[in-house]
Every structure is written in structure tokens, then in C-alpha cells.
Image (cartoon, rainbow, N blue to C red):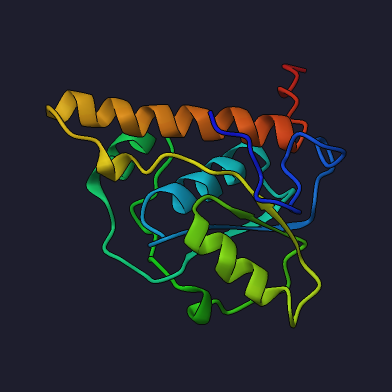
């Protein structure tokens, strides 16, 4: 897992860990793998607690491997419609978490006109994985699992008690 933030930017390892914003935008390059997975995981872990959306520098075509690895954990992303920053209906976010360098630069541009905190979580793009179907799916699972851990840590996830 990479945890280095670009010069002058904070990473999720500083004072923000555990601070739960009301609205989060996850951003990546094409909005078909990393950011939709992160948004879906956040909605699953924090239902009705954090307003969550995703966007990309440009929209793409939904990724079947992303859908497969999310289906494995019971999270349906089949209705996800890839969107670019320009296509966002709402920009009233407390925090933008960027998952790719291009998205980070786009998010910083958005902060010129909106008061939004930005965190950079560099993540591997599993669409670059090669090999068998099983090996490629393992790369997607690795991303999903890494994002799950980072989201839980960043927003201080607590398991629900079995009253």
C-alpha cells in the first residue's frame, strides 16, 4: 500500500484519521474501477452516515471485473454510471479522496472555487494487471481489500453490535 502524499498534501495518516465528514467524493482517472468501488464500500460501511459519490477525470465504460469482485462481497455496483467531474450534479463535498494522480490534480482545481479538503490515496490500477482471469481478479480483490481497510481506518468504522 502506498501512503505518500504529494508534497504539501496531507495523507490519511495524519490528524484526519477518524474525523468523519458528512459528504465525500472519491475520484480516479476514468470512474469505472477505483472510485466506484471506494464509494460503494463507504456506503456499505457507513449507511446513511456519509453522503458518498464518485467521479473521474473522464467517464469510461463500466468494468466487469470491478462488478465481479464487489458481487463477491454482496455489494452491487451494476447501476453505477461513470461520471466526470464536469458531470457532477453536486459539488458540496467536505472531502475529496483522490485515488490517481490525474484525479488529484482535477480535485485541486476544484478547490480553487470550492472550500473542499483533498486527500491523496495513491492506489494501483488493477486494469493494468495481466495474466489469467484468476490473476486479474486477484488484482481487483487486492484493490477492494486495500480500499476497505483504508476507509475503515480513515472514518473510524465500528462493527455494529448484535443487540
- When the figure is inspected, residue 129 is found, relative to residue 108, above or below; the finding is above
Image location of residue 66, percent across then percent down: 32, 43
Of residues 76 and 151, the one nearer the viewer is 151
Which quarter of the image is occupied by the C terminus? top right
Residue 157 lies in quadrant: top right
As drawn, the residue found furthest toward the left would be 132
- When the figure is inspected, residue 15 is found, relative to residue 80, above or below; the finding is above
Rendered residue at 46%/45% (across/down): 37
| Residue 63 as seen in the image, left or right of residue 59 | left
Of residues 157 and 124, the one nearer the viewer is 124
Rendered residue at 32%/30% (across/down): 139
- When the figure is inspected, residue 159 is found, relative to residue 51, above or below; the finding is above
As drawn, the residue found furthest toward the top would be 162
| Residue 67 as seen in the image, left or right of residue 118 | left
As drawn, the residue found furthest toward the right would be 15
Q: Can residue 146 be seen in this view?
A: yes
Image location of residue 64, percent across then percent down: 23, 47
Image location of residue 90, percent across then percent down: 64, 76
Residue 17 lies in quadrant: top right
Residue 131 lies in quadrant: top left
| Residue 100 as seen in the image, left or right of residue 13 | left
Image location of residue 24, percent across then percent down: 68, 57
Rendered residue at 76%/77% (across/down): 114
Q: Is residue 54 visible?
A: no
The number of callouts visible is 0
Rendered residue at 62%/67% (across/down): 107
Amino acid at each position: 500500500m502506498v501512503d505518500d502524499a504529494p508534497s504539501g498534501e496531507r495523507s490519511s495518516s495524519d490528524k484526519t484519521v477518524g474525523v468523519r465528514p458528512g459528504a465525500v467524493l472519491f475520484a480516479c482517472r476514468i470512474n469505472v474501477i477505483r472510485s466506484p468501488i471506494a464509494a460503494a464500500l463507504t456506503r456499505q460501511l457507513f449507511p446513511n452516515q456519509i453522503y458518498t459519490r464518485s467521479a473521474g477525470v473522464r467517464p469510461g465504460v463500466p468494468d466487469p471485473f470491478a462488478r465481479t469482485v464487489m458481487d463477491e462481497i454482496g455489494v452491487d455496483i451494476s447501476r453505477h454510471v461513470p461520471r466526470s467531474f464536469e458531470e457532477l450534479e453536486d459539488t458540496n463535498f467536505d472531502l475529496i479522496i483522490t485515488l490517481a494522480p490525474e484525479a488529484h490534480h482535477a480535485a485541486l482545481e476544484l478547490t480553487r472555487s470550492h472550500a473542499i479538503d483533498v486527500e491523496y490515496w495513491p492506489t494501483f490500477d488493477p486494469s493494468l494487471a495481466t495474466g489469467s482471469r484468476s490473476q486479474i481478479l486477484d488484482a481487483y480483490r487486492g484493490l477492494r481489500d486495500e480500499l476497505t481497510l483504508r476507509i475503515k481506518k480513515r472514518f473510524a468504522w465500528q462493527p455494529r453490535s448484535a443487540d
